[in-house]
Image (cartoon, rainbow, N blue to C red):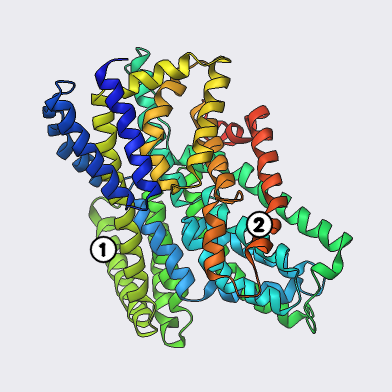
Amino acid sequence: MALPEVLAIAMVVAVCVLLFAGYPVALTLGGVSFAFAALAHLAGAMDIGLLYALPQRIFGVMTNTVLLAIPLFIFMGVMLERSRIAEDLLETMGRLFGVMPGGLGISVVLVGVLLAGAKGVVGATVVTIALITLPTMLRHGYDKRLAAGTVAATATLAQIMPPATVLVLLGDQLNNSFQAAQLAKGNFAPDSVSVSDLFAGAIVPGLTLVALYLAFIVAVAICRPAAVPPIRGSSPGGGVLVHVLKALVAPVLLIIVVLGSILIGLATPTEAAAVGAVGAVLLAALRSDRAQGAVALCLGAFAVMMLLRAIFDLRDGLGFALALIVMAALAVGLLLALREVHRAGYLVPTIAKTTQTTSMIFTILIGATLFSLVFRGLGGDDMVHRALGNLPGGAAGAILAVMLAMFLLGFVMDAFEIIFVVIPIVAPPLLQMPGVDPVWLGILMAVNLQTSYMHPPLGPTLFFLRGVAPPEITTRHIYVGIIPFVVIQLAMLVVLWFAPGLATALPRMLYGG
């Protein structure tokens, strides 16, 4: 083995050792990469001038319009959490379904799906859902193991339910890998893999997982009703139904508008994320009676703008003038809504959390960009390509090996870290192999990471949950409770492997190809 390849392997090992030791991911990636670049230059194994490409790569990351959706989606999810909209949803849906055994568990899954898709960050979603739901489930007599398992499994849907942040990042990295694979095969006008493709591909598997979770809870309610008792004193009367509709319609409509506009091609993910962020602000403002007029002004201006768009050419003349007036009204309404959200104490914590999470993601991305650059400079990508190509079983064997590696890495690395570090290395050679669909591969990876996140004994979701769970829930309760949901996840992986159409049929129907 040549010296550059030895250094490439040593660099990967050094990164893994330091991550296991608890060093920050972004600093580990950047520091180890710089150290090995200097060592390789001194040993004559790599020209240090390769690092001159780093500023241009960082500039490309920071100006990537797809990645601009990340802070907007995070803002939307955090605002829905801080304004206690998700908590109200759980309470009202619990009252609706609570009359029957397992009803509260069903409510947790349904509300968790909305919250998971909006937040998109597994750790944050676990903490949020656990703090909101676990005390309620225990107070009403739910089995501790089932309560813990339901919360952990629902929170990890943040990996797969659009418009999840993870899917945005995965779509961007898979597109880069697919472009590189096509160029390597001699196709100099390749197609692209968009975030919209991945969103569409994730819908059927994601909803299938939700249906399987619900079916399991219903089965427990039938076989062991004492483990999932109904809420005492609950009654799905007309007043409750009206309250549920008031609490449910607006958040669900927001998710449908954001996701639907992406899927039908009306908006890019970034544009839809901006709509989602504004919509979350308006929903939070609606919790104050003083903001009713501001929200009505925003919605009215938006409706008029859609009408003008259908009637006039908004680029010049009368249409342009009318559009300016309507946009001014929309801006005034939004500013008034923001003022009320700030007065309620939602805005500053939301901005702070959004900034913190976004900074973490992009810092990791920059460190991973440097790691990828040095790894390629040492010939590591060629080495990985040869290794995957020489595995028995062809493309299937290579994908299985990568899935196993990602599953194990999911115990110690965040999904963002795996997407930024592993995908650029392994995806290009996989996508050069015959019969490998990029959307199917991406969804398979997302479900795989979701499974590893909650798999005992090292799944990160279990540790997040242990940190915020009430004292009466022990580690044993969490580990035992998650087992049925892990079995469901593994079954979903097997089904996806043998029925790739679950992930590819909807994107092909919507976008062709």
> In the rendering, at what x and y percent does residue 441 appear?
52, 31
**Residue drawn at (39%, 22%), measured in percent from left and top?**
384
**Residue 61 occupies which quadrant of the picture?**
top left
The image quadrant where one finds the N terminus is top left
Q: Is residue 395 above or below residue 23?
A: above
- What is the number of callouts on the image? 2
In this view, the residue in front, 263 or 122, is 122
Q: Is residue 235 left or right of residue 154?
A: right
**Residue drawn at (48%, 51%), measured in percent from left and top?**
164
**Residue drawn at (26%, 63%), measured in percent from left and top?**
324
Q: Amino acid at mark 1?
A: Leu
Task: State how far apart marks 1 and 2 are (Cα).
Answer: 57 Å
Seen as rendered, the residue at the extreme bottom is 290
Q: Is residue 88 above or below residue 356?
A: below
Q: Amino acid at mark 2?
A: Tyr
> In the rendering, at what x and y percent does residue 500 appear?
62, 29
In this view, the residue in front, 100 or 471, is 471
- Whichever of labels 1 and 2 marks the residue nearer the N terminus, that label is 1
Residue topped by disc 1: 324
In this view, the residue in front, 261 or 34, is 34
> In the rendering, at what x and y percent does residue 212 appear?
73, 49
Q: Is residue 39 left or right of residue 274?
A: left
Q: Is residue 495 left or right of residue 356?
A: right
**Residue 278 occupies which quadrant of the picture?**
bottom left
Say the numbered circle drawn on residue 216.
none
Please tell me how crowded label 1 is: few (under 14), some (14-19), or many (20+) other residues with Cα within 10 Å.
Answer: some
Please tell me how crowded label 2 is: few (under 14), some (14-19), or many (20+) other residues with Cα within 10 Å.
Answer: some
Q: Nearer the viewer, mark 1 or mark 2?
A: 2
Residue topped by disc 2: 479
> In the rendering, at what x and y percent does residue 389 appear?
46, 15
